[in-house]
């Protein structure tokens, strides 16, 4: 009987359906992206953080053990993750101009002593 109320309910239902479809599509695309051979940056970030905190709370003479250097009175921990390239990923390798490794992730963690 009330046509105005029916229109509002239909718009609400369509909006909820659109939101659900968008969420499912988002989950699907993120799953496909993780299968794409990328790197797990969270793993490397946690590794750098753990080494930095271990160096921070250990004796300063042991800081080198964790790969920590000292710059301007602060500890610095650098991590570079490299990925080897195959000749089919980089066609320049066929003519000898390509590099064997490509920098994928660079992390610089700076903290006080």
Image (cartoon, rainbow, N blue to C red):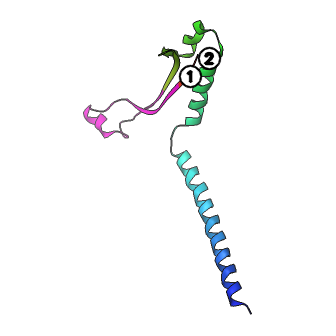
Q: Which residue is mark 1?
A: 111
Left or right of 77 in this view: 23: right
Q: Which residue is mark 2?
A: 56
Q: Is residue 5 above or below residue 80?
A: below
Between the C-alphas of marks 2 and 1, the distance is 8 Å
**Label 2 crowd (10 A; few <14 / some 14-19 / many >=20):** some
Marked residue nearer the N-terminal end (2 or 1):
2
Q: In the rendering, at what x and y percent does residue 90 appear?
A: 34, 39
Q: In the rendering, at what x and y percent does residue 71 appear?
A: 47, 16
Q: How many marks?
A: 2
Q: In the rendering, at what x and y percent does residue 17 appear?
A: 65, 70
Left or right of 45 in this view: 82: left
Left or right of 76 in this view: 53: right
Question: The magenta stretch spans which residues?
Answer: 80-109
**x 52%, y 17%: residue:** 74
Please say whether residue 75 is one of the residues in the magenta stretch.
no
Q: Is residue 92 above or below residue 35?
A: above
Q: Nearer the viewer, residue 104 or 74?
A: 74
Q: Nearer the viewer, residue 87 or 71?
A: 71
Please say whether residue 90 is one of the residues in the magenta stretch.
yes
- Hey, which residue is sitting farthest right in the picture? 1
Q: Are marks 2 and 1 in contact (CB under 8 Å)?
A: yes
**Label 1 crowd (10 A; few <14 / some 14-19 / many >=20):** few
Q: In the rendering, at what x and y percent does residue 106 appear?
A: 47, 30
């Amino acid at each position: 009987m009330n046509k105005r109320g029916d229109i509002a309910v239909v718009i609400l239902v369509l909006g909820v359906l659109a939101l659900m479809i968008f969420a499912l599509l988002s989950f699907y695309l993120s799953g496909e992206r993780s299968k794409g051979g990328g790197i797990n940056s969270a793993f490397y970030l946690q590794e750098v953080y753990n080494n930095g905190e271990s160096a921070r709370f250990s004796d300063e003479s042991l800081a080198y053990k964790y790969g920590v250097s000292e710059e301007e009175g602060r500890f610095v921990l650098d991590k570079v993750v490299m990925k080897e390239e195959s000749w089919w990923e980089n066609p320049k390798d066929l003519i000898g101009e390509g590099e064997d490794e490509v920098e994928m992730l660079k992390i610089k963690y700076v903290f006080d002593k």
